[in-house]
Image (cartoon, grey):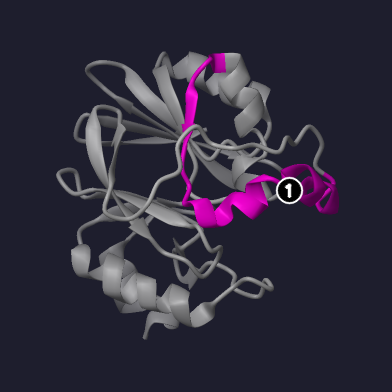
Amino acid sequence: MSSGEQPNLNVAIIPVTPLQQNCTLVWNGTTGAGVVIDPGGDVDHIVGAVEESKMMVEKIVLTHGHVDHAAGAGELREKLGVRIEGPHIADKFLLSSLASQAGKFGMTGARDVEPDLWLDEGQTISIAGYDFDIFHCPGHSPGSLVYVQRENNFALVGDVLFQGSIGRTDFEYGDHDALIDAIKTKLLPLGDDIAFICGHGAPSSFGQERQMNPFLQ
């Protein structure tokens, strides 16, 4: 588990599943209230990290419906007694086939799941006591969402954008042009100083990716 801080926002990254997906804990340093982002599996490991952080989980939040991000959400909801919010309803077909997706990657324990609340662009979501703006950024999956907290210059981007790369679009439902357009027209204009945690690999910032990411040149 690796950790970091934004002003009054504590962050811990827990790699889960054989695909080493970044399940992320975000919690308020004052109140202790927080969320679990993208619990893709290894639920007992996530619960242990939650207990270690002493955060009080208010909800589970999903960025999109791929198995490595969402397969543990149903079990974790049951264990913690909290809601699941997100992603966009366009990923419903993925969330309803998590168990079959898991078999392709040799993952066990995956459950199909439906969120308590679908989310969409133009709305906000409360995470750790802060309002995050929601941006619909399809292309990697049809329902991928990005959550941005402007006051703290902090974003959770799922598999939309990575350090030096972007989300895969070679699925039958992928759309490379749509993904690039969403990044360039919705995310980069928010400002270079916004740091982000992505679904795999190291954190980065919109400014670093605008300047250095070969997919965005």
Q: Residues within 10 Å of mark 1 (few under 14, many from 20)?
A: some
The image quadrant that residue 108 belongs to is: top right
Residue 66 visible within the image? no
- Could you tell me which residue is drawn at 73 percent across and 48 percent down? 97
Residue 150 shown left or right of residue 125 in the figure: left
Q: Residue furthest bottom?
A: 217
Q: Is residue 12 above or below residue 17?
A: above
Q: Is residue 18 above or below residue 180?
A: above
Quadrant assignment, res 40: top right
Q: Position of residue 217 (x, y in %)?
A: 36, 86
Per the image, is 147 magenta?
A: no
SS assignment at label 1:
loop
Q: Position of residue 70 (x, y in %)?
A: 61, 41
Residue 30 versus residue 34: which sits nearer the camera?
Answer: 34
Q: In the rendering, at what x and y percent does residue 137 appear?
A: 41, 64
The residue at 78%/42% (across/down) is 99
Residue 85 covered by magenta stretch: yes
Q: How many marks?
A: 1
Magenta span of residues: 80-106
The x and y percentages for residue 72 are 65, 33
In the orientation shown, which residue stands out farthest toward the left?
151
Closer-to-camera residue (107/179): 179
Residue at image position (65%, 75%) is 170
Q: Residue at x 64, y 36 (%)?
A: 113
Q: Which residue is mark 1?
A: 97
Relative placement, left or right, of 55 versus 66 is left
Q: Amino acid at mark 1?
A: Ser
Q: Is residue 188 visible?
A: yes
Look at the picture and state if 159 lies above or below 7: below
